[in-house]
């Protein structure tokens, strides 16, 4: 006798046809509800194709108008990529380290200890520096034997560029950490979304004047725009514009102080509302 012959009607039919659209629909419905409750997830769906299109659209437009631009300064794109990674990893070093504490359900224990929020900010910044150096240094060293390009040829300005990009990465990371603390882990994708959303405005691979005129004022509000313009001035003109560097530094200090105050405020709100014990999606 067949092992399934004894099963009553419905169970036997399920064994013959193992797919249940009701169960499939239940799983789909759960994730639709998650999307409906999480605007960062909805934003992320349309965000990546749009940002890629905008960024590489500007790169293509610039190269079409300046076909010999890259040949005038060896390694300008590689240097830009390495410096961009400092900014990117500076942001992730703060945001991801903070979210790791949330994933481990450790935030409540941390804030119940004598640890002060400002001390947590300092620890996140130092850990971000460590992670950034570990991540970027091997790539910078490999660029010389592989492509005969050394980002260290920028000289002393490289340290100033590094510090400015890292600090702005900290500012973005602290704001993201605060938003994730306030909105829950459903907002964790902001760690990647925000950093790439502003990439087209930073002039990483092309000068700011390539952007439409109505976008250029927004670009000049971002410290990385001044840093990458300064990098190109060194590679092309062999001079460092002190105006660009000073403007980037003053903007960075303002953003960093504002980000710290925002993070501390959200920590205070989280303690008052009991958000440290109710983190979820």
Image: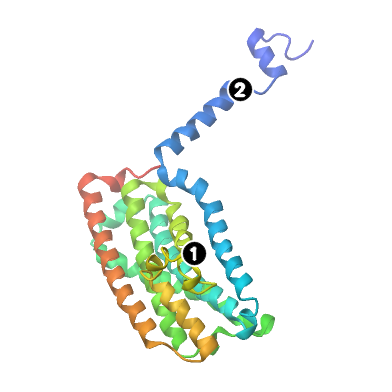
Residue drawn at x 40%, y 55% is 99
Q: Residues within 10 Å of mark 1 (few under 14, many from 20)?
A: many
Quarter of the image where one finds residue 14:
top right
For residue 21, the mark is 2
Q: What secondary structure is found at the residue carrying circle 2?
A: helix
- Residue 196 placement (x, y as % from top left): 48, 60
Q: Is residue 240 left or right of residue 260?
A: right
Which quadrant, please, contains the N terminus? top right
Question: Which of 28/43 is in front?
Answer: 43
Alpha carbon distance from label 1 to label 2: 43 Å
For residue 200, the mark is 1
Question: Does residue 271 show up?
Answer: yes
Name above or below for residue 122 compared with residue 107. below
Question: Does residue 8 show up?
Answer: no
- Residue 236 placement (x, y as % from top left): 54, 87
Question: Which of 80/127 is in front?
Answer: 80
Which quadrant, please, contains the C terminus? top left
Q: Is residue 24 left or right of residue 36?
A: right
In the orientation shown, which residue stands out farthest toward the right?
1
Residue drawn at x 51%, y 72% is 204
Q: Is residue 275 left or right of residue 70?
A: left
Question: Which of 37/74 is in front?
Answer: 74
Quarter of the image where one finds residue 129:
bottom left
- Residue 70 placement (x, y as % from top left): 62, 79
Q: Residues within 10 Å of mark 2 (few under 14, many from 20)?
A: few
- Residue 195 placement (x, y as % from top left): 45, 61
Disc 1 vs disc 2: Cβ atoms closer than 8 Å? no
């Amino acid at each position: 006798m067949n092992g399934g012959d004894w099963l009553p009607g419905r169970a036997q039919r399920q064994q013959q046809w193992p797919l249940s659209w009701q169960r499939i629909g239940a799983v789909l419905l759960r994730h639709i509800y998650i999307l409906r409750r999480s605007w960062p997830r909805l934003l992320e769906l349309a965000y990546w194709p749009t940002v890629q299109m905008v960024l590489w659209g500007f790169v293509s437009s610039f190269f079409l108008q300046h076909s010999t631009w890259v040949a005038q300064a060896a390694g300008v794109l590689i240097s830009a990529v390495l410096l961009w990674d400092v900014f990117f990893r500076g942001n992730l070093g703060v945001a991801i380290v903070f979210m790791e504490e949330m994933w481990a359900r450790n935030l409540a224990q941390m804030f119940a200890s004598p640890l002060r929020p400002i001390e947590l900010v300092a620890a996140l910044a130092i850990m971000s520096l460590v992670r950034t150096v570990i991540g970027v240094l091997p790539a910078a060293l490999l660029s010389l034997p592989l492509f005969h390009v050394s980002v260290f040829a920028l000289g002393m300005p490289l340290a100033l560029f590094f510090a400015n990009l890292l600090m702005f990465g900290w500012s973005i990371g602290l704001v993201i950490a605060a938003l994730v603390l306030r909105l829950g882990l459903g907002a964790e994708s902001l760690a990647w979304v925000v950093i790439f959303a502003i990439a087209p405005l930073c002039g990483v691979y092309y000068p700011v004047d390539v952007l439409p005129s109505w976008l250029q004022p927004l670009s000049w509000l971002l410290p990385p725009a001044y840093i990458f313009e300064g990098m190109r001035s060194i590679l092309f003109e062999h001079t460092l514009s002190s105006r660009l560097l000073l403007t980037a530094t003053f903007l960075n200090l303002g953003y960093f102080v504002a980000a710290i105050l925002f993070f501390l405020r959200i920590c205070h709100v989280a303690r008052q509302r009991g958000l440290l014990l109710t983190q979820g999606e």
